[in-house]
Amino acid sequence: MQNKFTIGSLAIVFSALLVSCSGYWKGDYTLKEKLTLRKAQVSANEEDYASAAQFYKAVFNEHKSDAYLNYKMGECQLLQGEVSEALTYFELAEAKSEGLEPMYTFRYGQALQKIGSYKKAAEMYEKFKSSASKSDLKYTNVQMYANQVQFAIKAVDKPMNAQVVNAGAAINSVYSDGIPSLTADGKTLIFTSARPDGMGAKAEAGAEYFQDIYGSNWNTASKSWLSAKMLEGGINTAGHDANTAIAPDGSSIFVYRNIQDGAEKTGSGDIFVSAKDESGSWSIGKQVTTINSDYFETGACVSADGKKVFFVSERNDVMHKNYGNTDVFMIEMQTDGSWSAPTNIGPVVNTPQDEISIFVHPDSKTLFFASSGHDDNMGGYDIFKTVYENGVWSKPVNLGYPINTFRDERHFVLAANGLSAFYATQLDAARKDLDIYQINLANYNVVTGVSRNSIVVKGLVKDAESGVGLPADVFVRNLDSAHVTRFTANEKGEFVYHVVGGQKYKLQAVIPGYNVYEGDIDAPMEQNLQAEMAYLASLQRDPEVKMNSVPVSEQEVFSEAHLTFVSAMDSIRFTAASKKAMAENIERLKKDTFLKVKITGNYFDPKESAEICMGESFKLVDYVRTMLLAQGIAFDRIDINAAGNTHPLTSDLKSKEGRAENTRIDMQIEY
């Protein structure tokens, strides 16, 4: 009897405790459901959000209108990185959110920030700040997030003049690709990828394949990256292998490796250096003992002068101060050639959050890195810049939008000429893993912070005598890049064109019966995105030229030439017959300067998408146009078009011969 009484008493006490700790469960919950909810709370307290979510889901179908349950399910999804699912639950909770604990508004704000809904996120953070306790305000660091969304709102309103595009199928795969690194000549790109064809093809349970290091070389002739291949030699192992930086001359690579067992077992992950031999094979590499410790280390890179090595570490002991989770550390070469002990570069750069992904500019003093802990942040990881001058690091500067977004941006590397950069992010909302993206920096100097913004040119082409507008063909050549754009003014002679501040352009307007107009556009260095400038092109009639001066009966009908290329498309070269036909057409164009030429690019590869084929056909067009311009054919006589894979000559699109016949330039000489 005593035992039964004791057990019954314990059951009563347990039930009372269960009810008392579940004050928010106001619905008609059974005792079994309350027990399940208590398990969910315990799992969440242990940061096992996947288990917590499963417990919550077990009772959700019977209590879909419970605001608190929706909030807790949303919180679990958010903390697992499932932002869309989290928002679904938060929005359901919002309708009945009155009386919910203040933490709901903070979590909802975080989810909104992660999709770039900055203004509503700001509202949620302000609600939280007005109702949360001092301890919760400190615990969440909500002011940092509030500052971030305000910065993001301003950044989106005033974007930098940079263009971000996917690096393409030659580099990226359907698997996770990241950590790009360039040699100084810009001709070798290495990166890390988790692909099934790698050495680490055996996946961890429920996770990606192990990572390996891949590389691609730049094809100067086709102006494109060759298909990436896994680096040869011992650099890739059956475990995790990731590059962190390649030497400027391409002779060595810093490698992050995490070996779980055996004689080479690492701590939580260590840095190795792999060297390339004369055959192009990479060594397995040696540990960098001056950097590695029992803590996690990664992200190593060396300054151009070879005197500093920067890396990321979690070390935090009496000898090494750590301001957050992962901080940036440095070792420096001493006068006797030895290396100093690692030192944290300080709280100006490092925050209580994570700093990762370091790149050192060739000036050896400008450091780019990714961080999630600075106030000037758009959400997740952003790319920042800091400069070491007079013995101190400058306040980090966010590179701005559209380089940084509400997503995670990391692993930034700048080309030596400063005109482009690569980094890893995921701008495709349909995917969750990383891709490598290229940033066009022709109009944005990330070192100086100067962004050349677009200026709207509102132009008018008119008859100089009558003032009547003319629908002329307009050609604009960027004198900095040599790029030529062709378009036609409307019936009133009006056109709109965008130029870049600080650059020079040459404009030509051409219409039969008039002298060719030629003028300059000097775009001022303008930071105002709304800047406009007017442009007037007045054309004089040419008394020597009459409209339709060539009678139809005398017009020669020119046949269209199909110019094909050698089948090895690693470089662009005409076949012998096409080379001869090209030379004949050039001679005709030189002789009869009133003739024009139309060139259309066609590219066929059954393994590539229509978008890739279109891009490749443009490369063929650029190749032929460059040849014509080099032979003195004026750019206003060249009409260009790209057809991609839309106009095959034969139905054979899969064989090597069929591809060679259909990949071509169609050239038509005309009046």
Image: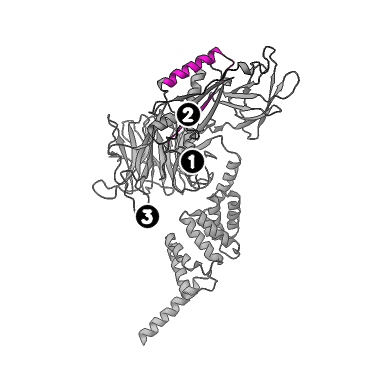
**Residue 225 is at least partly visible in this image:** no
Q: Quadrant of the N terminus?
A: bottom left
The region drawn magenta spans: 577-605
Q: Which residue type carries mark 3?
A: Gly
- Of circles 1 and 2, which is in front? 2
What kind of element bears circle 3?
loop
Residue 393 in the magenta stretch? The answer is: no
Count of marks, rendered view: 3
Q: Which label sits on residue 619?
A: 2
Q: How busy is the neighbourhood of tag 2: few (under 14 within 10 Å), some, or many (20 plus)?
A: many
Between discs 3 and 2, the one toward the N terminus: 3
What kind of element bears circle 1?
strand
Between discs 3 and 1, the one toward the N terminus: 3
The residue that mark 3 highlights is 206
Q: Is residue 404 left or right of residue 230?
A: right
Q: Is residue 191 left or right of residue 152?
A: left
The residue that mark 1 highlights is 383
Name the residue: 54% across, 60% down. 89
Q: Is residue 339 left or right of residue 154?
A: left
Name the residue: 54% across, 17% down. 633
- Of circles 3 and 2, which is in front? 2
Q: Which residue type carries mark 1?
A: Ile
